[in-house]
Image: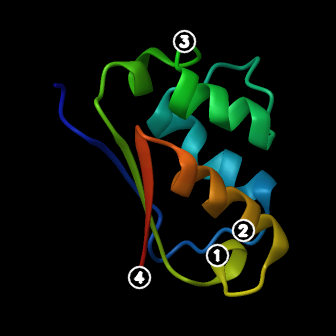
Amino acid sequence: MAEELVVDLRGRAPATLDAFWDAVAEPCGLPDWFGRNLDAWWDAVESRGVSPVIDAHGVLVVRADAAGLFAPGHPDGERLARIFTEATRARLELW
């Protein structure tokens, strides 16, 4: 299987989903038409067929600080983290 695609957001702490989409768009090769919502993210990381960059790797790994969007109790961060938990080809590593 292809190697992991690691997107390291440590030290950046995106505070919103929009900031998260901005941070991952380029390294993940997300197209301009990417929906910038959690359903579109699921399609990109689990269903595949959205990004050739993600598709070329076995697993997408996003590393982030447990701050901003990923601070404990942040509702959007918890929803996003749940997608990583349910996905078989993506994981979130919080530091």
* Mark 2: few/some/many CA within 10 Å (<14, 14-19, 20+): many
Label 1 to label 4: alpha-carbon separation: 10 Å
Whichever of labels 3 and 4 marks the residue nearer the N terminus, that label is: 3
Three-letter code, disc 1: Phe
Horizontal and vertical percent position of residue 59: 33, 38
Label drawn at residue 95:
4
Q: At 47% across and 64% down in the image, what residue appears?
A: 9
Three-letter code, disc 3: Gly
Horizontal and vertical percent position of residue 4: 25, 40
Whichever of labels 2 and 3 marks the residue nearer the N terminus, that label is: 3
Label 1: which secondary element = helix
Label drawn at residue 77:
2
Q: Quadrant of residue 80?
A: bottom right
Image vertical order of residue 79 relative to residue 61, above or below:
below
Three-letter code, disc 4: Trp
Whichever of labels 4 and 2 marks the residue nearer the N terminus, that label is: 2
**Circles 1 and 2 in contact, beta carbons < 8 Å:** yes
Image vertical order of residue 84 relative to residue 47, above or below:
below
Label drawn at residue 49:
3
